[in-house]
Amino acid sequence: MNNKRNRILAYSFLIPSLLLTLVFGIYPIGWAVRYMFYDYKGYGTARFVGLDNLTQLMQDSTFWNSVVNTFIYAGGKLVLTIPLSLLLAVLLNRSFRGRNLLRAVIFMPTIISSAVIAVVFVTIFNSYNGILNQFLVKYHILPTGIDWLGADHAMLTTILIAVWGAIGNYMLLFIAGLQNIPQDIYESASLDGAGKVQQFRLITIPMLGPVLQMVIMLAIINALKGYESILVLTEGGPIGKTEVMFLYVYKQMFPTMMSGTSVPDQLIGYGSAAGFVTALIVGGITIAYRLASRKLNKVY
């Protein structure tokens, strides 16, 4: 009787989560997979076109440009975010006055909406009257302002903003990992003559192996699927310099949200095909990382 009651209780906790997953996860995926084989603009009758959407996508240079931009954006974000997060974690894991305040300040951007962050940075990086350019010119650091959101600097600007927004989250994960390392190991290494750099290289990094793998995985996924701040900052421009995969999909599915004098058609079928291929790319990269991380398990 008790076993039956426990099973009923367990299922009662599982059912809400399963329903939410079904309604907001599995059903939308199935819906998108279905419409990738149709010519559908969000109204009227959906016309079956088979693999035409996928064929068109394979020949779409704009989409493949967004794929390249995604790798540049994700790579730049990862290269900067992971080392800086680890460095901050090591520094803020020490005991000193104001440590918790600094942790909170650095973590704060991670709980703010990406769109809100982008709006703030638009006023900072505005090419004509932005706060940063006014500062640089006023104090004679540069003779003229920089077009931060122009074709030459837009990608770098979006990467720096993304790093600022993500660094606090990974920093806390690294701090949690550092606090699980026994201090006796460092004391023994110090008695054996190991310096701080040697301790970091031979003790901290290996002992952080599992946390590091998790952080890298999260960072890869978040970097590949990030587009919200880019949408607000540049809308993928100028001339497609910051167009990433998920932003490209978003534009096909929700064109009315984009600026311009005319609103293009809502391409549900084509956008679904682009979303499917994008998911395959992200999934392939994730699987490749998981295979590579097995080697890290052997090392650490």
Image (cartoon, helix red, strand yellow):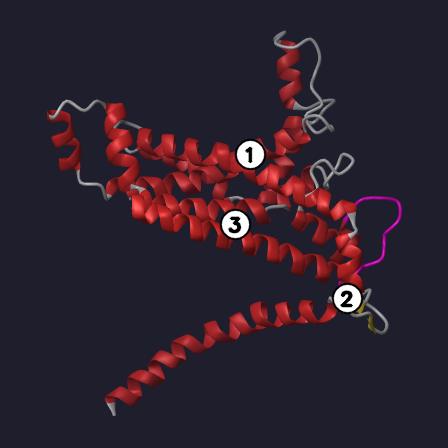
Q: Specify whether residue 267 is painted magenta.
A: yes
Q: Which residue is nearer to you in this view: 72 or 266?
A: 72
The quadrant in which residue 50 appears is: bottom right
> What range is drawn magenta here?
258-268
On residue 51, the disc is: 2
Q: Residue at x 55, y 34 (%)?
A: 76
Q: Residue at x 49, y 33 (%)?
A: 79
Whole-percent x and y of residue 285? 54, 50
On residue 76, the disc is: 1
Q: Of the two numbered discs 1 and 3 on the same chain, state the one appearing first in sequence.
A: 1
Q: CA distance from mark 2 to mark 1?
A: 34 Å
Mark 3 is on which residue type?
Ile
Residue 73 lies left or right of residue 254; in this view the side is: left
Principal SS element in the magenta part?
loop
Callouts 1 and 3 close, C-beta under 8 Å? no
Q: Which residue is nearer to you in this view: 213 or 31?
A: 213
On residue 221, the disc is: 3
Q: Of the two numbered discs 2 and 1 on the same chain, state the one appearing first in sequence.
A: 2
Q: Of the two numbered discs 2 and 3 on the same chain, state the one appearing first in sequence.
A: 2
Kindly report which numbered mark, 2 or 1, lies closer to the viewer in this rendering.
Answer: 2
Residue 181 drawn above or below residue 147:
below
